[in-house]
Image (cartoon, rainbow, N blue to C red):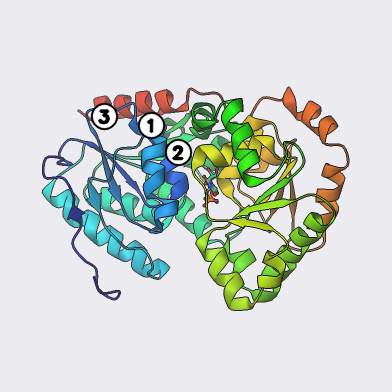
């Protein structure tokens, strides 16, 4: 497929029509993790349209199998394009798909380009739209994700908000309370379902050559940390100093970060870290549970640490998940504050673990998938 024109959606299974289905539109790793618990509530009617925003196999294909989400019924293959082209091509492909095969409802999650494309296509056909993880706000207009999530919330017919703060954000924008339901976040269920048993965790640590409670786990992939060579150098430099101080830093590296680090000539800094390819979901959770500290700019990881009871340094200018900051996470700019905060949290690991152990996750319990499915069914009943 040419990179400049939109192609037709490739429907991979002839017998998997989207007609009358609950259509899940998604394009990235965290959407697979968080929509699988919802799709599992619709064993016969769920269909999946995958835009391929994350087209690297390590970020997508293995996640479908591991998270128990059915393989895509339609692939749109828009990955590798500009943001505008991803949104435009995915919307166009979905528009043509839904014109031929009309779903009963479209479900999208979060704030990606796939989320916005799914919302626009559903809206164009008057198909009821469900937004999972509604109401997050960073109030940072420099983030494309903030624009995506605001637009999708205003288009959606059913807004599934994880927390009271998310509900309040929606009401503050005059979104009708009748469209909003507080469900918790499906990530809680995902963590409980996929965290490996202790024996598997012990073997994983042995394979990687790290000890429980004696290493730091990190992920870095956001443009604000990777696009500028100097900023990326600062972040990697802080991580390398943590490693030099005796805390091995395990870094399953996102392809975006690897490409940026290579371009910027940061190989010397990476050599001081334990760099691996991205790892599967269960193994990542296992490492997060066994780490002394996590340093990350990920959205999903901010939620997962609250279920696992582990401390997190969030390397970002802003967050749309302030709930994590109350007890589990510290927000720091990409600079020396990373090392200072990490050192403070590493000073007494057992004490921090005890402190976090009894705290419930602000993102709810394992009910979110069932609550979202029930609200979706009620929406469809109301419409008939
Ligand atoms: N994750 C994973 N393997 C890795 C790194 C992350 O399974 O090597 C998971 C992580 O647990 C979380 C999700 O991927 O559920 C986060 O993805 P990402 O950081 O790409 O997206 P964001 O959450 O920032 O939108």
Q: Is residue 158 visible?
A: no
Real-space CA distance between mark 3 and mark 1, rounded to the nearest whole angstrom? 16 Å
State the image coordinates of residue 232 (x, y, percent, origin top left): 67, 68
User: Do the residues bearing badges 1 and 2 touch, measured as CB atoms within 8 Å?
Assistant: yes
Work out whether mark 3 precedes mark 2 in sequence or the reverse, and give the earlier one: 2
Q: Is residue 2 left or right of residue 207?
A: left
**3 vs 2, front mark:** 2
State the image coordinates of residue 223 (x, y, percent, origin top left): 57, 65
User: Do the residues bearing badges 3 and 1 touch, measured as CB atoms within 8 Å?
Assistant: no
Q: Residue at x 49, y 27 (%)?
A: 193
Which residue is labeled 1 in the image?
38
Identify the secondary structure beneath mark 3.
helix
State the image coordinates of residue 272 (x, y, percent, origin top left): 73, 62
Which residue is labeled 2 in the image?
34
Choose between 264 and 156: the one closer to the eye: 264
Q: Any atom of ligand 1 within 8 Å of the CB at mark 1? A: no
Instruction: Locate residue 335: give its quadrant.
Output: bottom right
Q: Residues within 10 Å of mark 3 (few under 14, many from 20)?
A: few
Identify the secondary structure beneath mark 2.
helix
Q: Is residue 45 above or below residue 343?
A: above
Choose between 227 and 327: the one closer to the eye: 227
Q: Is residue 9 above or below residue 153?
A: below
**3 vs 1, front mark:** 1
- Residue 380: which numbered mark, if any? 3
Real-space CA distance between mark 3 and mark 2, rounded to the nearest whole angstrom? 22 Å
Total label count?
Answer: 3
Q: Any atom of ligand 1 within 8 Å of the CB at mark 2? A: yes
Q: What is the quadrant of the N terminus in the image? A: bottom left
Q: Residue at x 62, y 30 (%)?
A: 307
Q: Is residue 220 visible?
A: yes
Work out whether mark 3 precedes mark 1 in sequence or the reverse, and give the earlier one: 1
Identify the secondary structure beneath mark 1.
helix
């Amino acid at each position: 497929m040419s990179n400049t024109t939109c192609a037709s959606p490739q429907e991979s299974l002839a017998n998997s029509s989207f007609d009358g289905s609950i259509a899940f539109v998604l394009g990235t790793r965290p959407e697979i993790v968080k929509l699988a618990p919802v799709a599992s509530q619709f064993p016969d009617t769920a269909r999946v349209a995958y835009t391929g925003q994350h087209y690297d196999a390590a970020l997508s294909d293995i996640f479908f199998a591991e998270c128990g989400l059915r393989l895509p019924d339609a692939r749109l293959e828009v990955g590798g394009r500009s943001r505008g082209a991803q949104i435009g091509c995915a919307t166009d492909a979905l528009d043509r798909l839904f014109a031929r095969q009309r779903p009963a409802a479209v479900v999208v999650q979060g704030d990606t380009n796939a989320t916005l494309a799914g919302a626009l296509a559903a809206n164009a056909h008057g198909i009821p739209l469900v937004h999972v993880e509604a109401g997050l706000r960073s109030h940072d207009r420099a983030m494309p994700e903030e624009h995506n999530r605001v637009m999708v919330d205003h288009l959606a017919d059913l807004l599934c908000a994880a927390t009271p703060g998310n509900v309040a954000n929606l009401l503050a924008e005059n979104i009708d309370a009748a469209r909003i339901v507080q469900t918790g976040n499906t990530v809680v269920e995902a963590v409980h379902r996929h965290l490996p048993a202790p024996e598997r965790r012990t073997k994983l640590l042995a394979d990687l050559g790290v000890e429980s409670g004696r290493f730091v786990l990190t992920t870095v992939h956001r443009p604000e940390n990777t696009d500028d060579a100097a900023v990326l150098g600062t972040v990697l430099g802080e991580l390398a100093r943590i490693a030099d101080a005796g805390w091995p830093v395990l870094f399953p590296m996102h392809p975006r970060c690897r490409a940026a680090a290579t371009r910027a000539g940061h190989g010397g800094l990476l050599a001081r870290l334990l760099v691996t390819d991205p790892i599967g979901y269960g193994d990542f959770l296992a490492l997060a549970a066994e780490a002394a500290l996590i340093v990350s700019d990920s959205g999903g990881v901010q939620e997962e640490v609250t279920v696992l009871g582990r401390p997190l340094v969030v390397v970002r200018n802003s967050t749309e998940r302030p709930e994590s900051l109350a007890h589990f996470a510290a927000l720091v700019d990409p600079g020396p504050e990373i090392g200072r905060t990490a050192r403070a949290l590493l000073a007494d690991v057992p004490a921090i673990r005890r402190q976090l152990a009894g705290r419930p996750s602000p993102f709810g319990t394992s009910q979110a998938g069932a609550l979202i499915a029930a609200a979706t069914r009620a929406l469809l009943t109301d419409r008939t």
